[in-house]
Image (cartoon, rainbow, N blue to C red):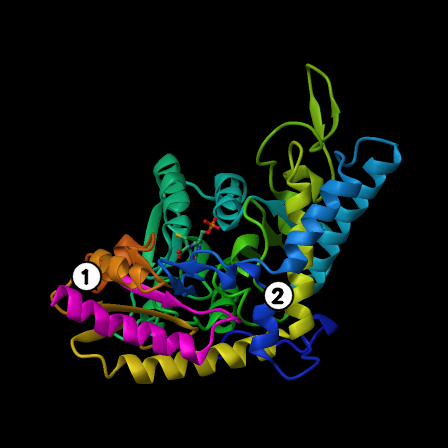
Amino acid sequence: MGTATTASHDVGHRPRRPFDVQRVREDFPILKEEIHGKPLVYLDNAATTQKPRQVIEAEQQFYLHDNSNIHRGVHELSERATQAYEDGREKVRRFLNARESREIIFVRGTTEAINLVAQTFGRERVGAGDEIVISAMEHHSNIVPWQILCQEKGARLRVAPINDRGELIWEEFLKLLGARTRLVAVTHVSNVLGTVNPVKAIVEAAHRLDIPVLLDGAQAAPHQPVDVQALDCDFYAFSGHKIYGPTGVGVLYGKANLLEAMPPYQGGGDMISSVTFEKTTYNTLPYKFEAGTPNVAGVVGLGAAIDYVCEIGLEWIAAYEQELLQDAIRKLEKVPGLTMIGAAREKAAVISFVLEGLHPHDVGTVLDQEGVAVRTGHHCAQPLMDRFQVPATTRASFALYNTHQEVDALVAGLHKVREVLG
Ligand code: C6P
């Protein structure tokens, strides 16, 4: 069973120089903030990442010099803005190694990307008695859109179970695939457990039965190389704000033949070819799915974020984050009363844990007083909390600018939590 991706496809993913975390940190002005008089230790990267100067400046430059609506005017600014937007699309295409730039649809984020597929592809292809297969570790964004669709169509949501390590149970997953399965929709990397799913093997298994596969890449694309052609997935979704880019912009990749056959998502400007009161014909890809004025500055920022991670090299980023993860696991194991949730053999740098006798919200509040930002709660994965029989967890999630000293600060913070809360 293969795992994840090993892309050697493109200049975009080739490391250019040894990874230097101090140099990287210089690019992120916010990391110099003090929180309650302590240096910020930002370990909430799965929720959103901080932005490098390069991204902030790219957006600023756009607004200072090039701002206009796109695809509409013949004037110079409109041409510049259109060019900047389409350059962003080409950067994403290269980043994912998609075959064609028309396979890249800009959306608001992963959530919208999945809803788009549910409401277009899903609406057309799913009928009464059909099935959609997801996994027990999905984010609500990859559960609820399918539930809505299933309710509408009289279809059934099937959930592949996971083991106590937080890994997909392969045989059980295979058993769910059948003649009624219309789509497999699974996360590439779990936002709670860090589990890296064997997505290539999932796609292969589904494709043997002609079942298309959507991958939720929200937690994968920022942290490891992704090659959609090598994976052969049919849809891939990710969010700009988790990859050091702006909020409000994200990507849906879809294979051209599938996108071509899908009806539009929203109606409005730019997605049409011609409109009369009697009949509307739709624009070609990718515009058919981009109704209304898009987040042009956001796409410019996302392009700058992609340039940024590609300049460093996704392989370097992945390797460095693995170092941090192993260091954190080793140290957290020694914290009395701490239980980590999820011990997948393929794991990204996300650690969820509970401290015996303490509510995660209290843990998070004391950590905040120490300058340590973590997320607490159900992480938009309530069924996964149920699976592990916990109401909530504390989650530390790492990014390329985190350091071993910050791992120590987290551990010191947890000792403080014990001191304060008993
Ligand atoms: N997870 C977290 O703290 P949006 O909100 O559309 O950018 O991404 C949604 C989403 C979808 N799938 C996965 C695996 C995710 O982790 C997320 C966002 C954040 O874990 C916010 S809930």
- Mark 1 residue crowding within 10 angstroms, few (<14) / some (14–19) / many (20+): some
Q: Residue 369 lies in magenta, yes or no? A: no
**Under 8 Å from ligand 1: the CB of mark 1?**
no
Does residue 160 appear to the left or right of 296 in the view shown? left
Secondary element type, mark 1: loop
Instruction: Name the amino acid, label 1.
Output: Val
Residue identifier under label 1:
390
Q: Position of residue 146 (x, y in %)?
A: 40, 46
Residue stretch rendered in magenta on the structure: 394-422
Q: Which disc number belongs to residue 27?
A: 2
- Residue at point 59%, 44% (across, down): 107
Looking at the image, is mark 1 or mark 2 earlier in the sequence? Answer: 2
Instruction: Name the amino acid, label 2.
Output: Asp
Query: Which residue is more in the foreground, 164 or 292?
Result: 292
Does residue 282 appear to the left or right of 164 in the view shown? right
Q: Position of residue 42 (x, y in %)?
A: 43, 64
Query: Which residue is more in the foreground, 309 or 104?
Result: 309
- Mark 2 residue crowding within 10 angstroms, few (<14) / some (14–19) / many (20+): some
- Residue at point 69%, 20% (across, down): 279
Query: Which residue is more in the foreground, 397 or 35?
Result: 35
**Under 8 Å from ligand 1: the CB of mark 2?**
no
On the rendering, which quadrant does ligand 1 occupy?
bottom left
Q: Residue 411 lies in magenta, yes or no? A: yes
Q: Position of residue 199 (x, y in %)?
A: 48, 69
Determine the CA span between mark 1 and mark 2: 38 Å
Query: Which residue is more in the foreground, 111 or 80?
Result: 80
